[in-house]
Structure formats: C-alpha cells, structure tokens
Amino acid sequence: MTIWTPQDDGHADLSSHDTFANGAPHNTFARLRRDDPLHWTEYEGGKNFWSVTRYEDITQMNKQADLFSSARGIRMEDQSYEEYLARRTFQETDPPEHSKVRMKLLKAFSKTTMAQYEEDIRTLCAEILDQALAKGTFDATKEIARQLPMRMLGRVVGLPDADLPWLVEKGDALIANTDPDFTSHVLDKMQTDEYRMMPFNSPAGAELYVYAKELMAEKERKGDTSGVLNLILEPAKDGSTITETEFRNFFCLLVAAGNDTTRYSIAAGIQALCHQPELLDQMQTGGAVWETAADEIIRWATPALYFRRTATRDVEMHGKTIREGDKLLYWFISANRDESQFEDPFRVDLMRSPNRHLSFGQFGPHVCLGMWLARLEVTVLFQELAKRIKSIEPAGPQKFLRSNFVGGIKELPVKVEAI
Amino acid sequence: MKVTWKLPGGEAVTAQADYGQNLMEAAQANDVPGIVGECGGSLACATCHVHVAPEWTEICGEAGEFEDAMLDLVENKQDCSRLSCQIELAPQLDGLVVSVPAD
C-alpha cells in the first residue's frame, strides 16, 4: 500500500514554502533527477540558485567543502556579510575552523556516550506512550513525536524540565520560521528587518539568548561545569575560544536543531506504520530489524530537506557553469528517493541494508552531530510503541509544515488499538 | 590491489581495491561491516577506525595530529589505530591487512 502520493504536477516551485505545505514535491524532484540534475531555480525572494537533486552528485559535492563552502550561509535566503557574522554558528564555517569547534563536542555526542542514555530514553518513552495511547485517537506529532526529543534535550543539555515547553516553542519559532502555526514573524512575509542580526532572523533568538545567559550565570554560581554548553566554552587546542555571539547562536542551534528533526522522523515513522501494516508485525517480531529500522525511518522522513553551499570558484558540471558565489541547494530529500541508489525508494523497508541515506548530511564535514542520539531515540520509541499497540490507522488528514527547509508532518491524527 | 579486513567475529573480507581510493572508500565499496565513514573522509566522525596489522604499521605511517585527536574519541584506541579515510591506497599497500575493532 502506498504511504503517501505526491501532489505536485512535476513543475513545482522549489523556492516556495507553500509548495512544501502539501508535502515534498516528489514528482518535480523525480523529473529533475532524470532531466535536469543541476537545475537553475528561480527565487523571487533573492538570488536564484542551483538545485542539486541526484544522490551521486550530492555525495561527491558534499565532500568538497573547499569548493562548495558553508561559510556564506546554509539556507536559501541571502544574507549580508554583517548578518552572516552576527548569526553564524559552526554550521556556517568550513574546515579547519569548523573542525576545531566540532572536536570539542564530538565526545559528548559520540555513539558510546549516547548509548548511556538508552534506559533514560526508554523510561521517557514509556511515560509518553502510556499517556498518549490511553486517548485512543490523538495527534501523534503532538502527543508522541514532539515529546521525546524535547525531554531528551533537557537531559543532554542539562535544562530544568519546567523550562522545556517554553524552550521548544522558541526553538520551533526559529526553525519553522516560515510556518504561521509556529511564529508570528513568518520569514518570507515579514515587514521588518529588526531581527536580521538575530539567530534565524527571529525575535525568539533574542529571547533564547537571554535565557542562555541566565542559565550560564546560574551554573557558574553553583560551580557546575557539566554539560555540552560548558564544553563549547572550553578553549580549543590552539587556545582559541568562541565569542559571546557564537555561544548564543550555538545555544539556539541546539534548541532548534536537536528537536524538530527527531520529532519529524518519529512522525514520519508513525505515518508509515499507519499505511504499511506489515511494519508493525516486523517490529513486533523484533531482533535484527532494530539494527536497520531507525535509519530507514530517518531516510523516509528526511527532515532536513536541503542544506545550501556556495561555490568558491567557477566549476563545470552537467554541461553548465556554476559561477563563483552561486548558491547550491543539496536536496537531501530528493537524493533519499533516488531510484539509482535506493530500490523502491517510496517503500519503507525496515530491513534495508546497506542504507546510505543522506538525512544526516553524510559524506561531508557537517554530518549531523546528534545522529547517534537521533537513531537511539527513534529505535527505542518504536520498540516501546510496538510493544503497546495492536493496530494503528489514520484518523484524519495529515498536515505538513510550511517550509522548504524542514520537512515534517505537523499534525498526524491517528487511532490506535492498545494491547 | 587486495585488502583484507579482519572482522570482530573472526571472519575476514578480502577484496579488490583501487589505487587512489582511500581505505574507507574501499571498505564502503565492498560493504565491509563496521566501517561506516559517515563524514566522507573529512575527519569529522571517527566511524572508520581500524587497527593496522603489525607488519603494515610502518608502511601505513602514523596518524596525523588531527586524526590522532579524533582517535582519542574511539573505543579501543591502540598504537596501531588509524582512521581508514586517511590511508590512501598505493602500490606499496597491496595485500594490506587491517582489523575492524568491536565497538
């Protein structure tokens, strides 16, 4: 059974957030992969850009960080140099500068460190699921998918539980800054440039900054130096430290990026369960399926639809000339449905192996720092869900986020029969 | 050229590799379990860790400074530890033997 059928006519406007409010335009991506893999995309809100849609191209280009740089912005929107400086994190730097900051955090986010959270995650999942499933019919994004990453963020970063709903609301306002359900300052409809120096061009960035400063002051008062926030303040091997602005931006990045991506992976997994009933059977059989299930769910979800790079010199590709300064969007969502890499890409196959999807931006220096945590959260959540339900089915139309940057099902009504 | 990966379970994979590839790419091309290589060789993930067999350590050379710092993050770091993305395959490495550490 088909999980979901794309709605676009094959010629959707990839620069338009409205396009993605109906789900990703996969007919358009399929056509571009076939006929125009390096597509010059018109963009009303700024400079036009190249859309890169094939798996093979994206993996090759992502390795070449010197040629396709992150240091001039990573989203479609153009930024002035001063805006870039004010808003950047280590996401917007290239090696070796990028690597210096990343090194400080790698241990905290490594597979081994994350594995220590497994029992914590399981306990949280049990709480969340028991509460949600008792309702019978509910919005799975709100009641399940949103809950787990939010509460794990608190554990990993060291934040009080009571602050988490507020923080996640602000995080959503940052990263879903093109969806009116999540922010009153919709990025492409904003009449003010008041927030252009704030993270994500959003007033929520300013509020999170105040929060982070108070949090750190409180920690210092108590002599508490634990957690990832302190790690990033440590000097690098060469003695360099990050600036206050960079710290603020890093905090916003943690709150925003650590949250919605895992949320939308879980939501997409639940969506798949609703439409491919054999998946629940497989999960209930257990065993080897758990070695591969999370990656397949995350491939299916692809919450980070694209990341942008900028060419640092002229380069020829597919008979076209990419000019220095041209923006390129690596459409991970398209690469993850590329027929030449994935057999039957629109089917969720929990045993898919190898599964070299690009949801974490693999094969480049910016590969997701939180990927082990994400995989673990997804695995444990579905293990616990499968233990508790006999069946799950849709209970109304799903709604997608209005964003061409973050792909997610923001409302997913489901009806479950508990065991 | 040929490379052999000894796996934690005691089995081994011997496969053909190409000069100019690095050892991580060769492992991926042959689906060697345990060599993930998430960052594509940009020294950002430490998921392609191998132990180089004693007779090959000298020819492979030592880890660079940055690579060594990355290796501090892995379990089972030993003197013969390398990130396989940093080993360029060349004729003098024909017959190379490495083992994939258990994680």
Image (cartoon, coloured by chain):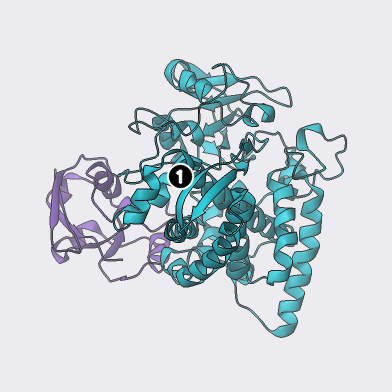
Chain colours: A cyan, B purple
Which residue is depicted at the point 23% across and 57% down? Answer: B60
Q: Dot 1 corresponds to which residue?
A: A273
Q: Report the side of A5 relative to A180 (left or right).
A: left
Q: Of residues A71 and A250, which is closer to you in this image?
A: A250
User: Mark 1 falls within which chain?
Assistant: A
Q: Quadrant of residue A1?
A: top left
Q: Position of residue A84 (x, y in %)?
A: 71, 44
Q: Report the side of A189 relative to A31 (left or right).
A: right
Which residue is depicted at the point 73% across and 70% down? Answer: A162
Q: How many marks?
A: 1
Residue B42 appears anywhere in the view: yes
Q: Position of residue A55 (x, y in %)?
A: 41, 32
Q: Of residues B12 and A149, which is closer to you in this image?
A: A149
- Residue projecting furthest to the bottom: A222
B2 versus A290 height, above or below: above
Q: Position of residue A357 (x, y in %)?
A: 41, 41
A65 versus A130 height, above or below: above
Q: Secondary structure at mark 1?
A: helix
Residue type, mark 1 in image: Leu
Q: Residues within 10 Å of mark 1 (few under 14, many from 20)?
A: many
Residue B37 appears anywhere in the view: no
Q: Report the side of B42 relative to A133 (left or right).
A: left
Q: Position of residue A189 (x, y in %)?
A: 81, 32
